[in-house]
Image (cartoon, rainbow, N blue to C red):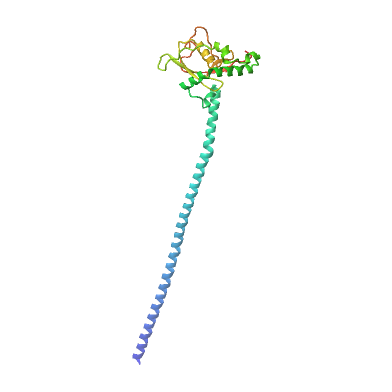
Amino acid sequence: MQFNKRIKDIILLCGRILLLLALLTLIISVTTSWLNSFKSSHVYPKEEEEKNEKRQKLVRKKQQEAQGEKASRYIENVLKPHQEMKLKKLEERFYQMMGETWKLSNGHKLGGDEDLVVENESQTSFETSNREAARRRNLPNPLVKVSPPAEQPMQKEVPDLPEEPPETAEEVVTVALRCPSGSIPRRRFFKSYSSQVLFDWMTKIGYHTSLYSLFTSFPRRPLEVEGGWSLQDIGITVDTVLNVEEKDPSN
């Protein structure tokens, strides 16, 4: 009897041990799964946060590039033309104050070919300019009418100019005349030439001294010519541009 009782006790003890082991196994498995789920719940939000941060950085980069392109287009299409227009207006105002508005135009190149053209067209320009000036002054008809070229009395008044010195000669100045027609003929003279040669040249290219006069560019003043004075005496010692202007009818 006692032997059977001991066997039962041993069997019960083993059963209890097995039950305890099963319970421990269950607890361990539940705990492990809970820990794994807890870890994964912390890992996934972190990964999602990193992805969101990358997406935000990419969006901000694209926005910055778009803003940069807009700024470049604004500078190129708005600011730059506005600044150029402002500089142009300042330049125009400066030249107007200095009396040099002719610099704002493209002008005419002063070259040797232009002298040939002026010589060929001097008679036609002479007739046209004097006729227009006389018409503005309402001069009598006999002065307005122009006789045929072979019988023009004014052609006899056109003086002969001295020979133009070569470019390599010394003591030479280049004088340009800015004419009302927009042309700018140029010619070389020795500084020792009489100052009257400038008015002779103006007459020869078609602007008679009875209707037109010569003025300096800056400061603007009429060119004074006295008998016996040379170009050097009246201050023309360097290359100079003179203005051909119509005389005031009141004077």
Q: In this view, which residue lies farthest toward the left?
A: 3
Quarter holding the N terminus is bottom left
Name the foreground residue: 163 vs 79. 163
Quarter holding the C terminus is top right
Residue 34, given in percent of the width and then of the height, sits at 44, 69
Along the horizontal axis of the image, is 169 left or right of 153? Answer: left
Q: In this view, which residue lies farthest toward the bottom?
A: 1
Residue 176, given in percent of the width and then of the height, sits at 50, 19
The quadrant in which residue 169 appears is: top left
Residue located 41% across and 77% down the image: 23
Residue located 41% across and 73% down the image: 29
Name the foreground residue: 124 vs 211. 124
Residue 249, given in percent of the width and then of the height, sits at 63, 15
Q: Taking the image as drawn, is residue 12 in sight?
A: yes
Residue located 38% across and 83% down the image: 15
Name the foreground residue: 156 vs 8. 156
Residue located 44% across and 66% down the image: 38
The quadrant in which residue 78 appears is: top right
Does residue 234 lie above or below 70 as drawn? above
Name the foreground residue: 109 vs 171. 109
